[in-house]
Image (tube, rainbow, N blue to C red):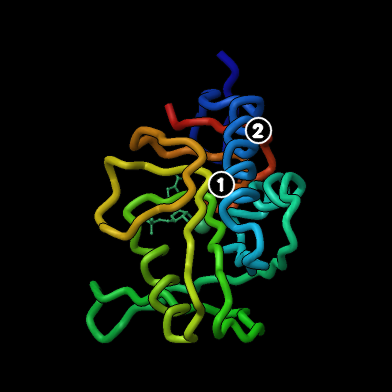
Amino acid sequence: MKTVKIKDKEFALSITSDKIQKAVCNIARKINTDLAGKDPLFLVVLNGSFMFASDLFKQLTIPCEMSFIKVTSYQGTSSTEEVKMLIGLSENIKGRTIVIIEDIVDTGHTIEDIKNSLKLKDPAEIYICTCLFKPKAYLKSIKLDYVGIEIPNDFIIGYGLDYDGFGRNYADIYKIV
Ligand code: IMP
Ligand code: MG
């Protein structure tokens, strides 16, 4: 079994690049059909989504724009109250069709916060597109419109995803052992 070591932890090959690319193609095909004529604006959530976004965009054939956003976490007034703030959005999104591009949806806190922040800017509609999804960890009810691969609750790295900043560079996905 192919493994990689990142810092103090060992990870074993879990999802091959080939399987990821098939999932990316499936999403692209659906988006090319569903969002034709809507001139969507794709908002890529950095850092993790850069690799997925790059592969996905190469498969899109409809007129579209893309831009990059980031979320920063800070603690609210009580230590348990974590708020995610959206930064980097310079476009006027009023009346636009928006597609949020995420690497992974785990509990769903991040994607929900991003969606709520964007709603305040009055877009016509917001779709969510994520490469990976952990359904057993998901605590929210908002619909995930485009999901590449559903995965178990293991911690993973590779294909943009990191452990403590490292491991984003692998084309395959590895899970912690
Ligand atoms: P959520 O807010 O719980 O849905 O978590 C979303 C964020 O947590 C993702 O955008 C990732 O940055 C990070 N994350 C969740 N699961 C993993 C994982 O297995 N490996 C690396 N990062 C993860
Ligand atoms: Mg992310």
CB atoms of marks 1 and 2 within 8 Å = no
Ligand 1: does it lie within 8 Å of the C-beta at label 2? no
Which of the 4 image quarters holds residue 87? bottom right
Q: Is residue 90 above or below residue 98?
A: below
Residue 28 locus on image (x, y percent):
64, 44
Task: Name the kind of residue labelled 2 in the image.
Answer: Gln
- SS class of the residue under badge 1? loop
Residue that appears at 42% across and 39% down: 155
- Residue at 73% x, 44% y is 59
Label 1 lies in ligand 1 vicinity (Cβ under 8 Å): yes
**What percent of the width, then of the height, locates residue 104?**
47, 49
Task: Decide which of 61, 171 is in the foreground and name it.
Answer: 61
**From the image, which quarter does the N terminus lie in?**
top right
In the image shown, does 96 or 110 lie closer to the viewer? Answer: 96
Q: Quadrant of the C terminus?
A: top left
Q: Which residue is mark 1?
A: 161
Q: Quadrant of residue 92?
A: bottom right
Tell me what residue is drawn at x 53 percent, y 45 percent: 131
Q: Is residue 98 visible?
A: yes
The residue located at (62%, 30%) in the rendering is: 22
Of the two numbered discs 1 and 2 on the same chain, state the one appearing first in sequence. 2
Give the x, y percent position of residue 102. 53, 55
Q: Secondary structure at mark 2?
A: helix
- Looking at this rendering, what residue extends furthest in the front direction? 37
Front residue of this view, candidates 27 and 76: 27
Dividing the picture into quarters, in which one does residue 139 lie?
Answer: bottom left
Residue identifier under label 2: 21
Query: Label 2 crowding class (10 Å Cα cut-off): few <14, some 14-19, many 20+?
Result: some
